[in-house]
Amino acid sequence: MRTFLQHLFFKRLARHLRRPGGWFGKKVGKKMNAANAYLYDATLNIMQPANNEAILEIGFGNGKFFDKIFARAGGLELAGLDFSEKMVEEAIKNNADQLASGKLQLHYGNSDHLPFADNSFDKVFCINVVYFWDSPARHLEEIWRVLKPGGKFYSIIRSKESIQQMPFANYGFIKYEQSEWIDILQSHCLKIRETRTIKEPEAMLKGKQYPVESWCFIASKEN
């Protein structure tokens, strides 16, 4: 019985990690903030936002980290797209001032159809999102389209070895070896510039600690 209940819990958790909804999704959004805070800071250190850049985040959750980006540089224009209506709702509440100023725009939708013009962004990034792209091709084609020539795409995922240790990842997560994701990126006109390894603090789940390693893939738009 316990095993069955654990199965149901992790299946439900995985579903809400993919697309948080309702009261449980709101709770998951807050948990993701705590779980991803270190990874988010490491990503910004790698990405190095620069003055007056236009940056898009895919999968921003409840939007608690946008202030971290704004603190890195002046004159930034930020946009975000998330697949969860609940997370967009929460992010609007959490970023009222930036939205009112016009410096930030938030959209609900799927990244296989981005609501932005061609050549709009200097940088696009997503953290722990690509596991949920059943067919990465359309998402990457859209990212290529909205990047400016020479613009960079930063995709951050946990290593296959790390994520396999997490019980919820058995439900709907597509896991990649480093070489597999590089091949997928390069097959869609995104040239790999560098891959960085990020050693995270150990994760705690149901009383058990898991060593965690993530990768940041830096790719640029090639015409």
Image (cartoon, rainbow, N blue to C red):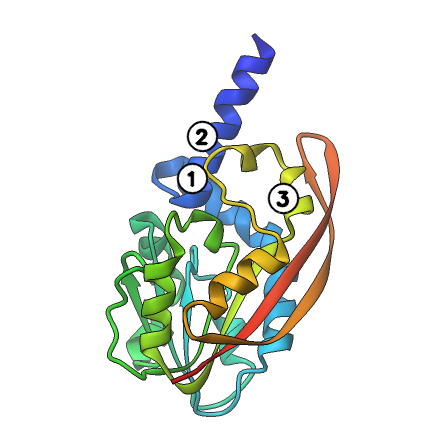
Element class at badge 2: helix
Which residue position is annotated with label 2? 12
Q: Where 116 sits versus 161, above or below?
A: below
Residue pictured at 70% horizontal, 54% vertical: 213
Do residues under tags 3 and 1 come within 8 Å of each other at their CB atoms? no
Residue at (60% x, 69% y) in the render: 43
Give the image quarter of residue 45.
bottom right
Which dot marks residue 135? none
Is disc 3 in contact with disc 2, using a CB cutoff of under 8 Å? Answer: no
Front-most of residues 192 and 201: 192
Which amino acid, by three-letter code, is at mark 2?
Arg
User: In the image, residue 44 lies at what x, y percent?
Assistant: 59, 74
Say which mark, if any, is on residue 163: 3
Q: Earlier in the sequence, mark 3 or mark 1?
A: 1
| Amino acid type for the residue under numbered disc 3 | Ile
Write down the quadrant of residue 218 in the picture.
Answer: bottom right
- Asked which secondary structure carries label 3, the reply is helix
Q: Amino acid under label 1?
A: His
User: Which is more toward the observer, 25 or 125?
Assistant: 125
| Label disc, if present, on residue 16 of the rendered structure | 1
Q: Are marks 2 and 1 in contact (CB under 8 Å)?
A: yes
Estimate the x, y position of residue 108 in percent, counting from the top left.
Answer: 27, 58
